[in-house]
Amino acid sequence: MSLLEVRDLTVHFPITQGIVIERRVGAVHAVDGVDIWIDRGETLGLVGESGCGKSTVGKTILRLVEPTSGTISFDGRDITRLSGEALRRARRRMQMIFQDPFSSLDPRQSVGSLLAEPIEVHGLAKGREVDDRVRDLLEVVGLPPASAGRYPHEFSGGQRQRIGIARALAVRPELIVADEPVSALDVSIQAQIINLMEKLQDEFGLTYLFVAHDLAVVRHIADRVAVMYLGKIVEVASSDELYIAPLHPYTIALLSAIPIPDPEVEMRRERILLAGDIPSPVHPPSGCRFHTRCPFRQPERCADESPALRDIEPGHTVACHYAEEIRDGRIGPRSVDPADAGAGDLVS
């Protein structure tokens, strides 16, 4: 049984008008019918453009955002039905590493206080045991024990993120949702944090949901990768297979944008440029949500019929009507004159 199973997760944020009497006039479709699962000890990468809903998925799993509908089963228990003390106990087993280490730490608390607070709140230790736990946590993430007496503003960005990781580890969780944990850091520091997270996973048997937009980072750490577009999962596969043989047009376009450190290969390969902007999540397109920008789209189905996420190969699921045709080379990207390009047309 998987440690985490998310079924048909939907998160809509209401849009209201009026000051005295508010009335709902619409909704932002942040997440629409997302299905994911993560086995114990596994890392699932969740990737997509900014605004696609991936961070909302991560926060909803921890009930930091309330779901509109769907189920979130953690270790066989639906946590969407929990509240009060039962939810607090469940949250001890699930923690989060936030994107911005500059704003996720309280500047008025010392590092020791930041790490001791969750230990004391959950009753995991008392007195000197808390201080010992804090020192151990700092050493585990590569910081000296003397750091406990300092404040967050005295540390660099990479060091602050290490403190954020230590805080997540303080209550001995089983699942950690990492919401773009390295996107605010320098490239050299990113590698250190990724290597630290992998080391901690091996040492403590952690399970990760790793949310990111950097496909190169995700390939390094993730066992499987789920690609998200405009609130929906469009492709899920093992990390190696997704990067070698992507089958959804959106994934193909994303991977074509990754630079290759070989000038000759970079010059020869085909780049897929998507025209137009991401549609509004307030009024998402009918049919396949990617059809307005898809260079592989076929007018007879894509605009009217929403594709289901289905198995194309063992362990490789794709939400595209024509995934088999793309795999077999029977459908390719359509090139058009830039002057005639509409939303979704490929410009080459």
Image (cartoon, grey):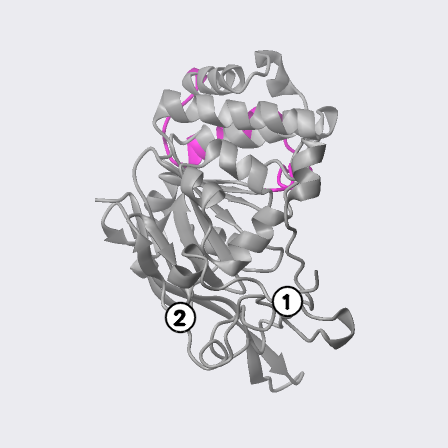
Q: Let me know if residue 151 is in the magenta part.
A: no
| Residue lying at 64% horizontally and 85% vertically, measured from the top left | 20
Q: Residue 61 at what x, y percent from top left?
A: 41, 52
Q: Residue 151 at what x, y percent from top left?
A: 68, 26
Q: Which residue is mark 1?
A: 278
User: In the rendered image, which quarter contains the C terminus?
Assistant: bottom right
Element type at mark 1: loop
- Disc 2 residue type (three-letter): Pro
User: In the rendered image, which quarter contains the N terminus?
Assistant: top left
Q: Which residue is mark 2?
A: 307
| Residue lying at 69% horizontally and 68% vertically, measured from the top left | 276
In this view, the residue in front, 99 or 169, is 99
- Disc 1 residue type (three-letter): Ile
Q: Which residues are magenta?
A: 99-128
Q: Residue 216, located in which quarter of the rendered image?
A: top right
Do the residues bearing badges 2 and 1 touch, measured as CB atoms within 8 Å?
Answer: no
Q: Let me know if residue 110 is in the magenta part.
A: yes
In this view, the residue in front, 30 or 271, is 271
Please state if 23 lies on the left or on the right of 302 as rendered: right
- Residue 36 is at least partly visible in this image: no
